[in-house]
Image: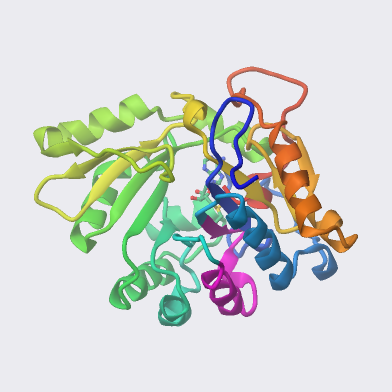
Amino acid sequence: MNQIIDPFNRRITYLRVSVTDHCNYRCHYCRDEDHQTHTKKSQVLTFEEIAKIVRLFAELGVTKVRLTGGEPLLRKDILDLTKMLGEIPGLTDIPLSTNAHLLPGLASKLKNNGINRANISIDSLDPVRFKEITRDGDLDRVIKGIDAAISVGIKPIKLNMVVMKGINDDEIESMTEFAINRGLDLRFIETMPIGLAGIEAVDRHYSERDILSRVRASYGDKLLPIQSKQTDGPAKAFKIEGTQTSIGTISAVSNNFCSSCNRVRLTAKGELILCLGQKDSVSLRDALRSGMSDSKMKQLILDAITKKPEKHFFDSVIDNISSRQMVEMGG
Ligand code: SAM
């Protein structure tokens, strides 16, 4: 019992842990306009509980744990958690996903506490547009956060840009230049129909095909395909010859990549989510708080995995679709 294999023979090696469902940004594709987070402290996993659950996953063969949210840097004393996770045997990769707003003050401490790489969300380089997309975010702070992360040596840093037709699709080239100039990687993300906000955002769908044809128009024969590692995300990626930058797309809608899915998600409230697109979940928090033994907890995880669906059904209507907002699931 030291591996998690789902019914479709996929090995689960990657756990995304949302450490809080609060966020200081309100990106309109991620949460509904009137969505409020009312989660109480007692409902949220403590750091000791997160570390315990992560250790069980590591004993079951998980090697990569991403800290996400909400905005993970809002969680007070997050550095204590990164330190605790850094001590768990078997974990080889503990990246962070952040909007970078709080990175200016935290980058160096994060680096000293085991965060060696990060994904940073940035959807526009125009301050007014950035404010609109994030509902009041501060582009200047985010760029300062990116530069702070670069200066302390967090590497690689991957920028994530959700591309939306008529909103920011005219920035594909300028975002690529921004990434190249700073030696960063860049992924263009298709909007996913998660929650009402995401479903509305699908009207703004800008396809992988269109994104790549724009990138090819600028960099054509300089794009060298990259072979991805098993724990890597579902991105299709290319190195841009003569630069430090790789560029890619994450296209959950155009391109159902579920056959290589290697991940599950743990929400801040301790629910284990098996697939972004479906509502099935199991409360690991309740099991842990009931005093369940480690071996029973592991069995609970393995039993949950039997419910992991073969694929999401973003392109059709089914009963089991998740009504959670992305901000609650960690992306
Ligand atoms: N606050 C952190 C951040 O900004 O990266 C972590 C949480 S955020 C939910 C994680 C990722 O999910 C971000 O890159 C965000 O752009 C992406 N995301 C949120 N809603 C999405 C949607 N409907 N479709 C595609 N990506 C989405």
The x, y position of residue 160, in whole percent, is 41, 50
Residue 58 place in picture, x, y as percent: 58, 56
Q: What residue do we see at 32% from left, 27% from top? A: 210
Judged left or right of residue 169, residue 318 is right
Does the segment drawn in magenta span residue 73? yes
Residue 2 visible somewhere in the drawing:
yes
**Could you tell me residue 157's position as x and y percent?**
34, 60
- Toward the viewer: 90 or 314? 90
Side of 120 relative to 34 (left or right): left
**Res. 172 image quadrant:** top left
Residue at position x 67%, y 63% in the image: 20
In this view, 156 is above or below 314: below
- Asked if residue 207 lies in the magenta stretch, the reply is no
Q: Quadrant of residue 142?
A: bottom left
Q: Quadrant of the N terminus?
A: top right
In the rendered image, residue 239, in percent from the top left (x then y), is placed at: 20, 44
Taking 136 as reference, is 124 left or right?
left
Name the residue located 59 percent from the left edge and 74 percent from the top edge.
Answer: 84
Whether residue 167 is visible here, answered yes or no, is no
Highlighted range, magenta: 65-88
Left or right for 169, reference 300: left
Task: Determine the residue located farthest toward the top in the rendered image.
Answer: 316
Q: How is the image coloured?
A: rainbow
Compare residues 325 and 86 and report the one nearer the observer: 86
Residue placed most toward the observer, 28 or 188: 188
Q: Is residue 92 above or below residue 326?
A: below
Q: Hey, which residue is sitting farthest right in the picture? A: 290
- Residue at position x 83%, y 66% from top? 40
Q: Is residue 164 above or below residue 259?
A: below
